[in-house]
């Protein structure tokens, strides 16, 4: 990756009374919209987005309640979140079909958007999300709620959260740059203590919406091309645990049920693929976009 990257421009746009923050990396041609995961921000894409601008106009959105976007108390169901995205694209004046790339919960959003607004998409990319039906692992919400509730940060200072990011979160993916990017999900109060930007109550509204989805019902309804980017965590290639075995089964199911599905595996890679493997991920996305732009040209 180049050592210097052209920084994006930062913007805020008001949609139905809410201020939505987004970053614009420029580029010309087909729009490429990037959406982050649960409790994340636009900065998950900082290392990938500049490498996509040769393919199109690249924009990353802070979704409702996240990053620098407003945080209302309601509206974290998929119908509202996907409507936010549709309204955002319309507010930017985008009328042509575009590519949508989502990471983690953002991939679930991309899945639901494709199911509701398929006619607006040239293609979609799900990066380690939009695949697992959590009800197969956690059959009741009471079980899932315990697993999906984030730990409290009472009394945690900035130096301590930096240590946790390095040692407990990013591990081998940590660099000074990714460590700083990970800090974007937090804010620091006047006393120097760390808080999450996303309120826990709103976090759990999203968690419940994810858990309640039955993905196998949605896949056959999606007609646009879909790329599934699936990381295999360190040590899980040769000796997968029960979660990874089930995940592989559901990836195969998704590929079979999608009208135009393609899977690319990223071995020895953590969940935050855009930070650990930005060059490889950008190359994979660029190839997917180029393939389907070429198919569009042939059809025309």
Image (spheres, rainbow, N blue to C red):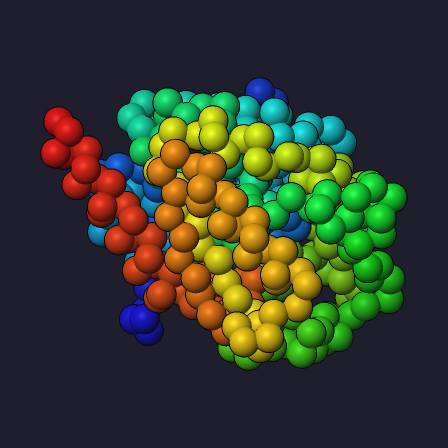
Relative image position of residue 109 (x, y in whole percent): 55, 37
Nearer to us in this view, 170 or 68: 170
Q: Residue at x 54, y 62 (%)?
A: 272
- Along the viewing direction, whichever of 213 and 154 lies nearer the viewer: 213
The quadrant of the image that shows the N terminus is bottom left
Position of residue 259 relative to residue 1, above or below, is above
Horizontally, is 97 left or right of 41 in the view?
left
Instruction: From the top left corner, tell me how far across and down residue 53 is, in percent.
Output: 27, 50
Q: Residue 279 lies in what quarter of the image?
A: bottom left
The quadrant in which the C terminus is found is top left
**Residue appearing at x 50%, y 43% in the figure:** 254
Name the side, left or right, on which 55 lies relative to 63: left
- Residue 133 in sight: yes
164 sits left or right of 11 in the view? right
Picture coordinates of residue 159, whole percent (x, y)? 72, 76
Q: Position of residue 24 (x, y in %)?
A: 38, 45
Indicate left or right for 217 with 95 as reference.
Answer: right
Residue drawn 24% across the image and 41% down it = 292
Q: Is residue 252 above or below residue 208?
A: below
């Amino acid at each position: 990756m180049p050592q210097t990257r052209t920084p994006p421009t930062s913007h805020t746009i008001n949609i139905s009374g809410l201020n939505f923050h987004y970053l614009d990396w420029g580029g010309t041609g087909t729009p490429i919209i990037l959406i982050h995961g649960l409790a994340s921000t636009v900065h998950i894409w900082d290392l990938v987005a500049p490498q996509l601008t040769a393919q199109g106009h690249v924009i990353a959105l802070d979704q409702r309640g996240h990053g620098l976007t407003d945080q209302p108390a309601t509206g974290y169901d998929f119908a509202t979140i996907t409507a936010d995205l549709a309204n955002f694209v319309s507010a930017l004046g985008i009328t042509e079909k575009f590519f949508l790339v989502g990471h983690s919960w953002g991939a679930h959003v991309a899945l639901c958007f494709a199911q509701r607004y398929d006619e607006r998409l040239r293609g979609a990319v799900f990066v380690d999300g939009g695949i697992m039906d959590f009800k197969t692992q956690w059959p009741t919400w009471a079980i899932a709620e315990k697993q999906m509730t984030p730990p409290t940060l009472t009394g945690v200072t900035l130096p301590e959260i930096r240590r946790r990011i390095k040692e407990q979160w990013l591990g081998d993916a940590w660099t000074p740059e990714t460590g700083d990017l990970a800090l974007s999900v937090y804010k620091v109060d006047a006393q120097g203590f760390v808080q999450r930007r996303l309120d826990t109550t709103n976090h759990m509204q999203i968690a419940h919406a994810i858990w309640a989805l039955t993905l196998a019902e949605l896949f056959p309804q999606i007609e646009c091309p879909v790329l599934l980017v699936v990381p295999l965590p360190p040590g899980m290639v040769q000796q997968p645990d029960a979660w990874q075995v089930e995940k592989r089964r559901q990836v195969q199911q998704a590929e079979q049920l999608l009208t135009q599905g393609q899977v690319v595996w990223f071995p020895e890679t953590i969940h935050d693929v855009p930070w650990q493997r930005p060059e490889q991920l950008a190359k994979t996305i660029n190839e997917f976009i180029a393939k389907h732009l070429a198919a569009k040209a042939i059809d025309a």
